[in-house]
Image: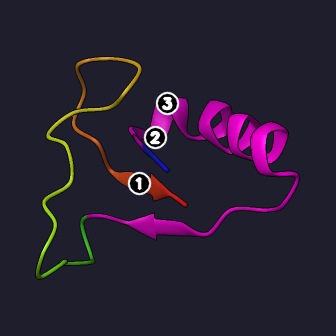
Amino acid sequence: MYVVCKDHLELAIDKFVDEYEDAPDLVDLECTHFNHWDPPAHCEQCAQKGKFLVV
């Protein structure tokens, strides 16, 4: 599972496919709210706001 900005979305998809050998699901964090989990405040690769969950 990766939380990334738009700039690093492709990299996260590639990493997911390499690790799990399957296509990930993409969740737009600006449109989705989780009751029991708060996503990280920033991208795993940089300081920008995390906008996508790759899972």
Which quadrant of the structure image shows residue 50? top left
Q: Nearer the viewer, mark 1 or mark 2?
A: 1
Regarding mark 3 in the picture, which secondary structure is present there? helix
Q: Residues within 10 Å of mark 3 (few under 14, many from 20)?
A: few
Q: Residue at x 23, y 19 (%)?
A: 47
Q: Which amino acid, by three-letter code, is at mark 3?
A: Asp
Regarding mark 2 in the picture, which secondary structure is present there? helix
Where residue 53 appears, as percent x and y from the top left, is 43, 56
Q: Which amino acid, by three-letter code, is at mark 1?
A: Phe
Circle 2 sits on which residue?
6
Q: Which amino acid, by three-letter code, is at mark 2?
A: Lys
Q: Residues within 10 Å of mark 1 (few under 14, many from 20)?
A: many
Magenta stretch: residue 26 in it? Answer: yes
| Callout 2–callout 3 Cβ contact below 8 Å | yes
Q: Residue at x 52, y 30 (%)?
A: 8
**Magenta-highlighted residues:** 3-29
Which quadrant of the structure image shows residue 33? bottom left
Q: Residues within 10 Å of mark 2 (few under 14, many from 20)?
A: some
Q: Nearer the viewer, residue 6 or 22?
A: 22
Where residue 28 appears, as percent x and y from the top left, is 39, 66
* Colour pattern of the rendering: rainbow
Tell me which label, 1 or 3, sits earlier in the chain: 3
Report whether 8 appears left or right of 39.
right
Q: Residue at x 36, y 27 (%)?
A: 44
Circle 3 sits on which residue?
7
Q: Measured along the vertical axis of the image, is residue 21 above or below residue 50?
A: below
Report whether 2 appears left or right of 13.
left
Circle 1 sits on which residue?
52
Report whether 19 appears left or right of 12.
right
Report whether 28 appears left or right of 16.
left
Residue most toward the right? 21
